[in-house]
Amino acid sequence: MDLKIKDNNFIVCGATSGFGHAITKLILKEGGNVIAVARGEDKLRELEDAYSGQVETLVGNITESRTIERLHKMTLQKNLSGILVNAAGPPAKKFVETRLTDWDEAYQQLVRWKIELTQKFLPIFLDKKYGRFVYIESSSVKQPLENLVLSTSMRLSVVGFVKTLSQEIPDQGVTFNILAPGYHYTPAVERLIRKKAESGKISLKEAQRQIENTIPMQITGDINHFASLAVWLLSPLSQYVTGQVYAVDGGVIKSTL
């Protein structure tokens, strides 16, 4: 399928790991260009070298205002088509294990910077009457998962602001959608497996087996398959879709909503 993104420009946050990396590679395969943001300079350089002419890089922590400002200045003349809003989340913890400082840090990691980034780039898309925002959150926004009280609580705030924004700006050619992945082979899931193993005093292999047993499909998701939905949402083909939360979780969520 031609996603009609050839020569289009996209910002991808967290472009060197997990979902962000898989989505970056698929955009590039489809002929698009990527402004890749991540903290690891070496991995960004590898990406730039592998896709000469299609990738520009920005080394920085996207959750910090100074990185968002640098990104904004860097892309003012880029004729952007979309942004993948994505970064690592807080540590896996139960509520009784958290302190107030954990909640403050989780707000910064998962909420504040996404609002700032959206405020910064939304006027650009409104001016051209076209743009795609795709936010990667978690399936826990539809059905809570163990040890993710910080992540679930803050990501629900993001869902609230994104869905409200989609209602406030429904007819300007700009769409806002959320992907809610379940268990996929990513660094975040590796952290969850370690946490489950430590809490239950079991092996990592047993912790992973127990997690997979909770998934109706009995498998962990493939990030490359996940990327295909993300890139479709970033493409012009998704023009009639906005304000939606897509769970990609192997059938874990039982709700009909």
Image: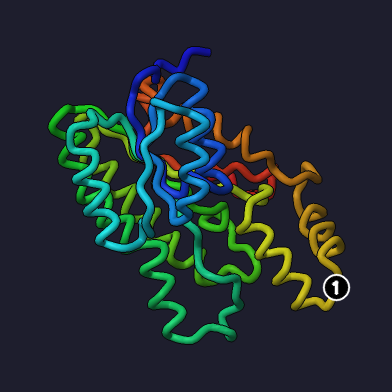
As rendered, which of 30 and 4 lies closer to the eye?
Answer: 30
Q: Is residue 112 above or below residue 172?
A: below
The amino acid type, in three-letter code, at marker 1 is Ile
Query: With 252 as the anchor, is 142 left or right in this view?
Result: left
Mark 1 Cα within 10 Å, few/some/many (few <14, many 20+)?
few
Residue 175, how many percent across, how many down?
31, 34
Q: Is residue 126 above or below residue 158?
A: above
SS state under label 1: loop
Residue 189, how many percent across, how many down?
66, 57
Residue in the image at 22% along x and 54% along y: 69
As rendered, which of 114 and 157 lies closer to the eye?
Answer: 114
Residue in the image at 82% along x and 54% along y: 213
Query: With 86 as the anchor, is 123 left or right in this view?
Result: left
Q: How is the image coloured?
A: rainbow
Q: How many marks?
A: 1
Residue 67 visible, this angle: yes
Residue in the image at 41% along x and 24% along y: 32
As rendered, which of 250 and 185 lies closer to the eye?
Answer: 185
Q: Is residue 33 above or below residue 70?
A: above
Residue in the image at 56% along x and 58% along y: 140
As rendered, which of 54 and 191 lies closer to the eye?
Answer: 54
Farthest residue to the left: give it: 127
Residue at image mark 1: 202
Residue 229 visible, this angle: no
Residue 85, how many percent across, how many down?
39, 47
Query: With 140 as the anchor, is 201 left or right in this view?
Result: right
Q: Is residue 196 above or below residue 136?
A: below
Farthest residue to the top: give it: 2
Q: Quadrant of residue 154?
A: bottom left
Residue 160, how many percent across, how many down?
35, 55
Q: Quadrant of residue 158?
A: bottom left
